[in-house]
Structure formats: C-alpha cells, structure tokens
Image: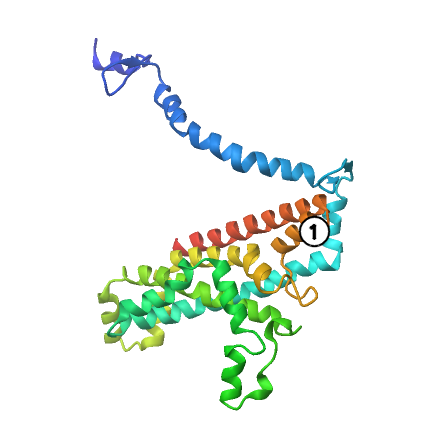
Amino acid sequence: MTPVQQMATPAATVRTPSGRRGRPGEPRRVAYLYILPAVAVFGLFILYPLIRTAQFSLYEWDGLGASSWVGLANYQAVFSEPQLRGAFVHALVLIVFYAVVPVTLGLLLAATMSRALLRGLGFFRVVLFLPQVIPMVVVAIAWRQIYEPEGPLNDLLRFVGLDSLARPWLGDYAWALPSVGIVGTWVGTGLCLVLFLAGMARIPRELYEAARLDGAGPLREFVAITLPSVRGELAVALTLTVIAALKTFDLVYVMTSGGPGTETTVPSYQVYNNAFLLGRVGTATALAIVLTAVVFVVTVVINRIGERGQR
C-alpha cells in the first residue's frame, strides 16, 4: 500500500497506550468516567439544593405547615420591602470596607514591603495575615468587646482627651455599620497583602532598574510596572473580598444581630431572619436566589475585567 493510499484509508480504530485497539472517541468516554464522581458530588450537594431552593421561592411556606403557590411574589417582596432592599444597600456599603479599602491598603503595604529592606519582614507578614486564620466568631466576639461603651476603644479615646468621640459604637445608628465594616477591613487586608506580595515577587528587578535609569520615581514605578504586573492577583483579591462582603453573616449575627433597628442587616442575615425567626421560608429562599445571582454576576464581571487587562 502506497503512502497516498494509507492517508486515504479512514482510521477505524485507535491504539491505546497498552497496545489494545479501540474505537475512536473511546479515550474521551473513559475520561468522563474519571470526572463522574466529582459531577455526582456537585449535583447532589450543590445543584440539587439550588434547584430545591428555587422551587421553594415560588411558594409561601412557614417551614412547617402546608405551602401555597405564589409565583414571583416572593421576588417582588425582595425588591419592594424596604428592609430587604436595604439589606443590599448595606452590603454595598460593606463592599467599600471589605474590598476597596483592604485592596488599596494591601497594594500600598505590599509595594512598600517588597521594595524596602526591613528587618523582621516575615514577622509583619504573619501578623497582618493572622486574622485570616482566626474563626470569624472569635473575631466578632473580640471586636464586640472592643466596641463596648466601657471597652478599650472608648477608654483609649478618653485617655487621650477625645471624650466627645466615645460612644456605644454598635448601638449608634450612624456608626454601627461602619464599625462592622472596619472589622472586615482588618480581616481582609492581610489576605490582599499576601496575594500582592506573591505577585510582586515575580517582577524582574531589571524592570525597576531600567525605570530608574529613565528617571522614574517610586510612584511612576508603581503605576507603570508594579500595578500592571499584579492584575491577576488584583482580580482574585477583589473577587474574594467582594464575595465576603456580599455573603457576610457571622460578624453581623454575633456583633449586632442586625441592629440597632435594621441598620446592619445584610442579605445573608435577612435570609436567616426570614426563614427561621419570621417563618417566611419562601421569601428567604427568594432572597437567597437573588443573592446567589448577584454574587455570580459580580464574580464574572471582575474576572472578565481581569482577563481583559492581562491581554
């Protein structure tokens, strides 16, 4: 058989690494068997509960008795009731404290620590990252004691002569939500710092040396070299911190229970409150679906922007 005839003959079989002949496409079918357990676990513990949640959101149900079909009325309540709508507004405020401020501080600290020759640099990294390994309930209890009217924060303000600034921070309608947000800033800054330090460690030193020869200062080096080099880490940090702000529950539950009034309620807390305290399971599940959709959209948008910046 000539080489031309061999090329014209269709391949009816393929040879596996072991030498056994098989049909075309068989390796692909075998590969599906390897991922089948993961798909089964995903479907059982994530996809099925999500479908059931979407089903519950179409009914009015107290969690115990009979349910009645209400269609999209629960979703209408999510966008029309001031308390539920306000929970998303509070989440947007927390995004500033959970994401914008930690990312900004993390960038500045990482840029400084990666360029400066400081003794004990590893110790400072550990200290700043430490809040990430402490359970959030422990963090909430500790900060609740700090914010108490007779707690360390007010004692410090009185000690330095700023008695007028002392207040019941978690009971003040104007300061309760920012007080919770500051805790989120304290927790998230260490994570952003470690991510950015890892990204900056890959930047060749020659780039900075060339920039200095061209007369660039520290600010110009940061904008032209450092910031573009950590776009991937920036996208990851924003994704993690924004999601943390949108789904925060433990800090609010332990520190304020949504108070004073409803000034610190967030979507996750309203899901718990409506489902287990008010007996509005349908409204709670509708709120959970909306929150899931918001988190998904935000994640996709941030990652698309990050991918576009890396091209």
Q: Can you see residue 109? A: yes
Give the residue displayed 27% in from the left and 67% down from the top. Answer: 122
* Residue behind mark 1: 277
> Residue 305 in the image: x percent, y percent?
47, 55
Give the residue displayed 52% in from the left and 36% down from the top. Answer: 45
Q: How many marks?
A: 1
- Image check: 98 left or right of 218? right
Residue found at the very far top of the displayed protein: 1
- Image check: 137 left or right of 292? left
> Residue 207 in the image: x percent, y percent?
25, 66
Q: Quadrant of the N terminus?
A: top left
> Residue 236 in the image: x percent, y percent?
43, 55
Give the residue displayed 23% in from the left and 71% down from the top. Answer: 209
Give the residue displayed 49% in from the left and 59% down from the top. Answer: 136
Q: Is residue 154 above or below residue 103?
A: below
How packed is label 1: few (under 14 Cα within 10 Å), some, or many (20 or more)? few
Q: Which is more toward the observer, 6 or 305?
A: 305
Q: Is residue 215 above or below residue 194?
A: below
Q: Which is more toward the observer, 58 or 210?
A: 58
Q: Can you see residue 98? A: no
Residue found at the very far bottom of the displayed protein: 161
Q: Is residue 198 above or below residue 221?
A: above
